[in-house]
Image (tube, helix red, strand yellow):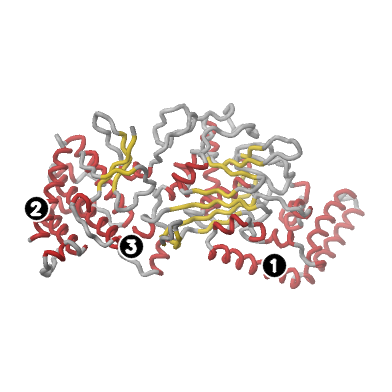
């Protein structure tokens, strides 16, 4: 590589970064000039092109240097491979430490797992946590106690940068299985790959420099906020003050604007759709009356169906309630905001940049009875030709079972459906869906969720429940004990009988 | 006992008085140069046919650690060589 070096005075040499870089560049260029053609070809193939891989290269070199006894700094704790620290965690022993693949090691959590926890490495040295009596198919059971390998609140915050905002009634916990298997945890540990969003951001900001790429996406601290929303939908009116204070103002106003826009559209649709709905309702009622008279349907069936259609027509005639609007909101159960660089002010007043992902999951119940009738809404009845009788009785199980789901390829947004029902509507599937948005968009997200449930069930069959790594605990009411929800809870049914993760 | 150990290229090359805003970038770039230098020198220790089998730097270093006698000592020598030449370039 040709270069031009302008003469500089000795005192400038100590202060100009370019001068240092040119001095170093000449060393590597000289070394390159002494390689054979074949060696140059190998080098060109092995040396990374992308910014992230370059970081991995630096961490790898640091490991080689440290293993050779050339390490020159130590730090009590480091969660991210943040410059200017290049290094890795090592077990210091009298004998030489074994070679450790660097990128993995750099991101390996430093704390010891809890007694019964699954170790986060690929080669477990301890007995894995046994799920209750594994059988040929996942056992359907609600746990009576919390799993032993839940990551402590302190470790979540300090090691992984995860903060969970619980509601007064529902607490979310995350098990160690998430560390190696969940896409957001992979991201938090800098094990992710560049995504479309990264590239879009870089294109918009005209950033092409490798260093800038690394600086933005691989050098800034990463955080995740999980907000449990104490309401039936993710809506700012259900956000607690604590949540609002923790949110980026831009994110809060973005959600508010989106919801307002959606609400206006939905209310408008009720007005404009009224004539057509009334006409359709009258036609259906005429037909139902005829079927009842001819004995095709019983009085009971007629009443149940009429009630459901009345429920469908009511908001068009009387105007929609909040619950009617909630049912039609998109992103109602959960929301994910992709992490883009955000300016923050540290406690000491210093400005810094960080990447923060946000997940919202609605876990609350509506106080209005109409919400509990959601499953009987006419929309569903039209989709489920057999009417209310086709709505399945929710199975009492703790672990999401792929047998309960299907993929509807006709739905380009949310293809994951309950087997006998047109939506999933559970806390567990919502949590998985939002977490998988880190690496995917609709409709792929639901497909990945389905795959993750299949993998979890497969591992469960083989004796490990570690892939059911979301746990929700609901406070018991009226003297009832707390309920452990491992992933799933059908929100529209009896609020006191949740399912698990 | 567990502890974190790492390598700071600025400290190693005795670079001081760097403007804080330049520090990270300079550290990143110098570490890139050192790692490339280390890769070149390591590759020169390995037979040509073997070298062509590697698919990553990780494989290269792993092979070197397992098969080259006193590789750690050689790494130290490479590092010293880099520093010596770097300082020569800086002052000359």
Q: Residue A107 at x, y = what percent? A: 37, 44
Disc 2 to disc 3: CB gap under 8 Å: no
Q: Is residue A376 above or below residue A313?
A: above
What residue is at 17 percent from the left and 38 percent from the top? B72
Distance from Cα at disc 1 to Cα at disc 3: 43 Å
Instruction: Tell which of A307 and A294 is nearer to you.
Output: A307
Which label belongs to residue A425?
none
Mark 2 vs 3, N-terminal side: 2
- Farthest-out residue, front: A348
Q: Residue at x 35, y 67 (%)?
A: A207
Please indicate, yes or no, whether residue A300 appears anywhere in the rendered image: yes
- Closer to the camera in the image, A74 or A230: A74
Q: Which residue is mark 2?
A: A34
Q: Are marks 2 and 3 on the same chain?
A: yes
Q: Which mark is residue A212?
A: 3
- Using the rendered image of the protein, determine whether residue A135 is visible from the camera's viewpoint: no
Task: Verify CB contact (< 8 Å) between mark 2 and mark 1.
Answer: no
Mark 1 — on which chain does it sit? A
Tell me the crowding category of disc 1: few under 14, some 14 to 19, or many 20 or more residues within 10 angstroms, Cα based.
Answer: some
CA gap, disc 2 and disc 1: 71 Å
Answer left or right for A16 relative to A372.
left
* Residue that numbered label 1 is attached to: A266
Disc 3, SS? helix
Q: Viewer-nearest of labels 2 and 3?
A: 3
Per the image, label 1 sits on a secondary structure element best described as helix
Position of the C terminus of chain A by quadrant: top right
Most extreme residue toward the left, as rendered? B92
Residues tagged by mark 1 and mark 3 found on one chain of the structure: yes
Q: Residue furthest right?
A: A293
Q: Quadrant of residue A483?
A: top right
Which is nearer the eye, A256 or A424? A256
Query: Which quadrant of the structure image shows residue A478?
Result: top right
């Amino acid at each position: 590589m040709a270069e031009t070096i302008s003469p500089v005075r000795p005192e400038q040499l100590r202060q100009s970064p370019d001068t240092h870089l040119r001095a170093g560049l000449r060393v590597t260029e000289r070394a390159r000039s002494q390689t054979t053609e074949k060696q140059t070809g190998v080098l060109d193939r092995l040396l990374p092109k992308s910014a992230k891989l370059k970081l991995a290269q630096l961490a790898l070199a640091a490991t080689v240097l440290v293993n050779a006894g050339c390490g020159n700094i130590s730090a009590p704790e480091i969660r991210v491979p943040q410059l200017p620290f290049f290094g890795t965690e090592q077990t210091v022993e009298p004998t030489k430490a074994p070679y450790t693949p660097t990128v993995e090691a750099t991101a390996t959590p430093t704390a010891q797992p809890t007694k019964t926890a699954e170790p986060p490495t690929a080669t477990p040295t301890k007995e894995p946590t046994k799920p209750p009596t594994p059988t040929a198919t996942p056992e359907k059971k609600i746990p009576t106690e919390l799993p032993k390998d839940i990551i402590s609140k302190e470790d979540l915050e300090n090691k992984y940068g995860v903060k969970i905002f619980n509601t007064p009634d529902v607490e979310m916990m995350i098990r160690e299985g998430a560390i190696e298997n969940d896409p957001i945890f992979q991201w938090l540990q800098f094990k992710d790959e560049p995504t479309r969003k990264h590239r879009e951001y870089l294109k918009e900001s005209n950033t092409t420099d490798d260093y800038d790429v690394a600086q933005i996406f691989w050098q800034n601290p990463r955080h995740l906020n999980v907000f449990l929303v104490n309401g039936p939908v993710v809506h700012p009116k259900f956000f607690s003050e604590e949540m609002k204070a923790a949110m980026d103002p831009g994110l809060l106003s973005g959600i508010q604007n989106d919801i307002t826009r959606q609400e206006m559209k939905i209310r408008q649709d009720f007005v404009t759709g009224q004539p057509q709905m009334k006409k359709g309702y009258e036609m259906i009622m005429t037909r139902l009356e005829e079927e009842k008279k001819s004995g095709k349907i019983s009085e009971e069936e007629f009443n149940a169906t009429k009630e459901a259609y009345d429920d469908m027509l009511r908001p068009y005639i009387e105007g929609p309630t909040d619950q009617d609007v909630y049912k039609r909101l998109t992103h109602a159960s959960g929301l994910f905001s992709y992490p883009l660089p955000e300016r923050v002010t540290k406690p000491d007043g210093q400005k810094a940049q960080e990447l923060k992902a946000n997940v919202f999951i609605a876990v609350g119940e509506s106080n209005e009875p109409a919400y509990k009738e959601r499953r009987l809404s006419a929309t569903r009845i039209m989709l489920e030709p057999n009417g209310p009788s086709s709505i399945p009785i929710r199975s009492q199980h703790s672990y999401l079972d792929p047998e309960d789901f299907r993929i509807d390829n006709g739905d380009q947004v949310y293809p994951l459906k309950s087997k006998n029902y047109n939506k999933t509507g559970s806390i567990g599937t919502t949590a998985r869906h939002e977490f998988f948005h880190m690496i995917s968009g609709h409709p792929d997200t639901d497909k990945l969720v389905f795959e993750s449930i299949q993998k979890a069930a497969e591992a469960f069959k083989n004796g490990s429940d570690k892939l059911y790594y979301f746990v929700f605990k609901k406070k018991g009411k009226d003297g009832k004990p707390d309920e452990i929800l491992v992933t799933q809870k059908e929100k529209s049914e009896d609020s006191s009988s949740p399912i698990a993760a | 006992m567990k502890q974190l150990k790492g390598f700071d290229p600025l400290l190693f090359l005795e670079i001081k008085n760097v403007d804080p805003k330049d520090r990270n970038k300079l550290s990143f770039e110098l570490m890139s140069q050192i790692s490339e230098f280390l890769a070149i020198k390591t590759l020169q220790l390995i037979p040509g046919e073997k070298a062509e089998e590697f698919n990553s730097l990780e494989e290269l270093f792993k092979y070197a650690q397992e098969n080259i006698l006193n590789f750690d000592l050689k790494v130290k020598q490479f590092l010293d060589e880099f520093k010596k030449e770097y300082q020569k370039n800086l002052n000359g």
